Image (cartoon, helix red, strand yellow):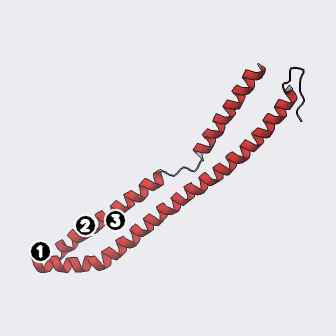
Amino acid sequence: MPQMRETGQPGFKAVVVGLLRDVRTLVRQEMTLAHHEVEYEIGKLVKAVLWFGIAVVMGAIGLITIAAACILFLYEYTGLPAWACAAIVSMILLGATAGLVVAGRGIVKSIRIIPVRSIQIMLDDLMRMANWVRTRFV
């Protein structure tokens, strides 16, 4: 039970003990939040790696299978030399692969290793507590 002053309000020692208990609880909660935020960012990193992997696989498969068929199609129906048909098909497939790489890069740019939101919330909470103490005891 907090020590009561004659005015019916808790004493300075009780307020400080309660404040320290609240700070300890807040720090635990913020650490849990930061942990979850880092897990979320790691998930985004895994997703980006997956997109890059898919882009590589699709690029390789496209260059090997579809390229051969398209080259033969162009060669047969356009009358262009085989090397020109191969160049046209390769540029189209590499352009599609580049688009997938750009999509993966966009995800990578959004990854934050430092839990920015948790740190900001913790700083805001500490400022509120400091202001509360200042208004009560200063």
Left or right: 43 as drawn, with respect to 54 = right
Residue on which the image places disc 3: 97
Distance of label 2 from label 3 (alpha carbons): 9 Å
**Looking at the image, do the residues carrying marks 2 and 3 touch, with CB atoms under 8 Å apart?**
no
**In the rendered view, does 76 fall on the left or right side of 114?**
left
Q: Could you say which quadrant of the image residue 122 lies in? A: top right
Q: Circle 2 is placed at which residue position?
A: 92
Residue 124 position in % (x across, y down): 63, 34
- Identify residue for label 1: 80
Give yes or no for contact between labels 2 and 1 (Cβ–Cβ under 8 Å).
no
| Quadrant in the picture for residue 84 | bottom left
Residue 101 placement (x, y as % from top left)? 38, 61
Report the disc number at residue 24.
Answer: none
> Which label sits in the foreground, 2 or 1?
2
Say above or below: 78 vs 29.
Answer: below
66 lies above or below 32: below
Q: Quadrant of the rendered structure where residue 5 is?
A: top right
Which amino acid type is marked by label 2?
A: Ile
**Quadrant location of the C terminus?**
top right
What residue is rendered at 17% in x and 79% in y? 73
Under tag 2, what secondary structure? helix
> Do tag 1 and tag 3 residues touch (Cβ < 8 Å)?
no
Mark count:
3
Q: Earlier in the sequence, mark 2 or mark 1?
A: 1
* Crowd rating for badge 1 (residues with CA inside 10 Å; few <14, some 14–19, many 20+): few
Left or right: residue 26 compared with residue 69: right
Q: Amino acid at mark 3?
A: Thr
46 or 2: nearer the viewer: 2
User: Which marked residue is nearer to the observer: mark 1 or mark 3?
Assistant: 3
Q: Distance from label 2 to label 1 (Cα)?
A: 17 Å
Q: CA distance from mark 1 to mark 3?
A: 25 Å
